[in-house]
Each structure stands twice: as structure tokens, then as C-alpha cells.
Amino acid sequence: MELQQEIRHAVNAVRLASKVCIDVQRNLINSETIEKKDRSPVTVADFASQALVCATLTDNSSVTDIVGEEDAGELRLDSNADNCEKVTSHVTKVWGSEISREQALGWIDLGNADPNRVDTYWTLDPIDGTKGFLRGGQYAI
């Protein structure tokens, strides 16, 4: 696939992630934030952004391996069932068609490539600056 076409797919993926971030930030409440093992925050928007970027790139471009920051394991816990439902709902809204919980979780986990086992991969930090995102300040996708 030619480079310009790859770039168009990447830009589209970031646009979708931006839409979900704006939507989540507009309705942000504290229960949409999870604390990772390293005590850093992760939000519904982080998970939804990763799902949308991974799905867009793997469906439309030659990208097959993504090393993402998030893992859907936290969302599979019973204690995070509400957040999992929110992620699925936000992804469905931006994607434009109904997706299942397992589909959303699977899209997040498309970002679990092991960089030591693949030759070429993309890296993804779905929201760089989550604390800024939570404050309504600066962040990047």
C-alpha cells in the first residue's frame, strides 16, 4: 500500500479517536477513570481511542501489528463492568454501527503486539497526557 494512503488511514484513525475523546471529556465523571498498577490514571477515552485506532488501522491499511499502551484485561474484571459498557457505548457511537462488548475488547487488544516478536509495528499511546485530559487541558493522541 502506498505511503500516502497509509497516512490517510492513520489520520482517519486519529480523527475517530479525537471524536471519542471529545465525547468522553464532555461527559467525564470520576467513575470513568481507572487506576493502573503503576498508579497512573486510565480513562474510558484511553480504551475507546485505542479500540478505534486499532480497528481502523487493521481494517483499512497494511498495519498488522500495533504496540499499544492499554490492555482490555482491566475492563474484563467484574469491578469495571460499568466502564466496559461505557467504552463499548462510546466506540459504537463513533464507529457508526453497533459493536459488541467482546468486539470492543478485541479491538483494544489488537494493540498487544510484542515488539520483540515482530519486525514492523506501529506504537500507540491513545491519550498522551491523561492527567491533562482529566483537567480539560492539553493532551495528544
Image (tube, rainbow, N blue to C red):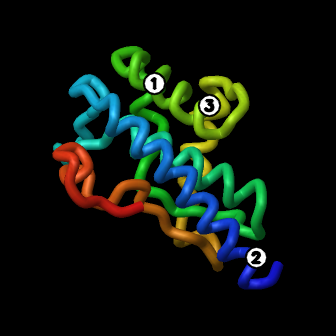
Tell me the element at label 1. Answer: helix
Mark 2 or 3, nearer chain start: 2
Q: CA distance from mark 1 to mark 3?
A: 10 Å
Residue 5 numbered mark, or none: 2
Placement of 105 over or under 29, stated as above or below:
below
Can you name the residue that lies furthest to the bottom here? Answer: 3
Mark 1 or 3, nearer chain start: 1
The residue at the point 51 percent across, 51 percent down is 17
How many neighbours does mark 2 have within 10 angstroms: few (below 14), some (14-19), or many (20 or more)? few
Q: Nearer the viewer, residue 9 or 64?
A: 9
Quadrant for the C terminus, please: bottom left
User: Do the residues bearing badges 2 and 3 touch, measured as CB atoms within 8 Å?
Assistant: no
Placement of 71 over or under 118, stated as above or below:
above
Q: Nearer the viewer, residue 78 or 97?
A: 97
Mark 2 or 1, nearer chain start: 2
Residue 92 numbered mark, or none: 3
Tell me the element at label 3. Answer: helix
Q: Quadrant of residue 26?
A: top left
The residue at the point 33 percent across, 39 percent down is 25
| Position in image of residue 136 (x %, y %) | 22, 47
Q: Quadrant of residue 79?
A: top left
Residue 109 numbered mark, or none: none
How many neighbours does mark 1 have within 10 angstroms: few (below 14), some (14-19), or many (20 or more)? some
| Position in image of residue 78 (x %, y %) | 41, 15
Residue 86 numbered mark, or none: 1
The residue at the point 59 percent across, 39 percent down is 94
Q: CA distance from mark 2 to mark 3?
A: 25 Å
Image-based side of 26 in relation to 58, left or right: left
Q: CA distance from mark 2 to mark 1?
A: 32 Å
**Which amino acid type is marked by label 3?**
Thr
**Which amino acid type is marked by label 1?**
Lys
| Position in image of residue 98 (x %, y %) | 70, 26
